[in-house]
Amino acid sequence: ENGFSRLCSSSSASGSDWVDEDTFQYFLLSEFPCMPSVLAKRLFLTWDVDNNSKLAFSEFLCGLCIITRGNAEERLEFLFRFYDLGEQGVITKDTLLRFDELVRETSSYKNEDHWTGLAMVEE
């Protein structure tokens, strides 16, 4: 049984071929305990491209592929959807600052000078 199938069997609709948000977040936060839950929620919502509150294997796989092997354009599109909280095609400076703060709080880079998460905002 593969990892996604195990997630599906842990989901609220056991035996289904999809994962619900709670199960996804539980799994992600247990694997990455320093990750803020808001980031896990945004990842689920970004990968749930059909907006049905269920993560199908194809959505899960496509999301992983974009993060790990996507070209620059695909990764930028993913990040834009991730940060576009209102799904209105706009990312505000305030949103970027809030996410940057979350990442800095949990990042191994928080005490290093080369972390430039706000480079685009400050320009």
Image: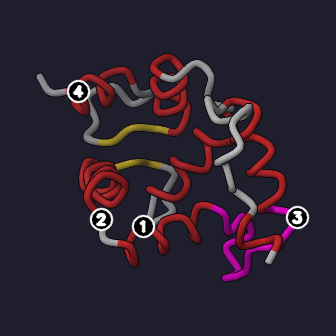
Q: Are the residues flagged by discs 2 and 4 in contact, CB closer than 8 Å? A: no
Q: Please say if 22 is above or below 6.
A: below
Q: Is 2 placed left or right of 96 in the picture? A: left
The magenta region covers: 83-95
Disc on the earlier residue, 2 or 4: 4
Q: Amino acid at mark 1?
A: Arg
The quadrant of the image that shows the C terminus is bottom right
Disc 2/disc 3 C-alpha distance (Å)? 27 Å
Give the residue drawn at x 52%, y 59%. 46
What is the CA distance from the residue labelled 3 to the residue labelled 4?
Answer: 36 Å
User: How many marks can you see?
Assistant: 4
- Badge 2 is on which residue? 70
Dots 1 and 2: beta carbons under 8 Å? yes
Secondary structure under the numbered disc 4 in the rendered image = helix
Disc number for residue 3:
4
Q: Position of residue 35 (x, y in %)?
A: 61, 29
At x 74%, y 74%, the residue is 91
Q: Nearer the viewer, residue 55 or 121?
A: 121
> What percent of the width, then of the height, locates residue 81?
57, 68
Using the image as rendered, state which of residue 51 and residue 32 is in the foreground.
Answer: 32
Label placed on residue 109: none
Q: What colouring does the structure picture have?
A: secondary structure
Work out how far the residue at label 1 is from the one at label 2, CA to CA, in angstroms: 6 Å
Residue 90 belongs to the span the image colors magenta: yes
**Discs 1/4, front:** 1
Who is closer to the viewer here, 82 or 117? Answer: 117
Q: Which residue, given by chain and number where applicable, does mark 3 sit on?
A: 94
Asked if the residues shown at circle 3 and circle 4 are in contact, with their CB atoms under 8 angstroms apart, the answer is no
Measure how far apart labels 3 and 1 are at the Cα level: 21 Å
Q: Which residue is mark 1?
A: 75
The secondary element bearing badge 3 is classed as helix
> For the residue carrying disc 3, how many other residues have a C-alpha within 10 Å: few (<14), some (14-19), or many (20+)?
few
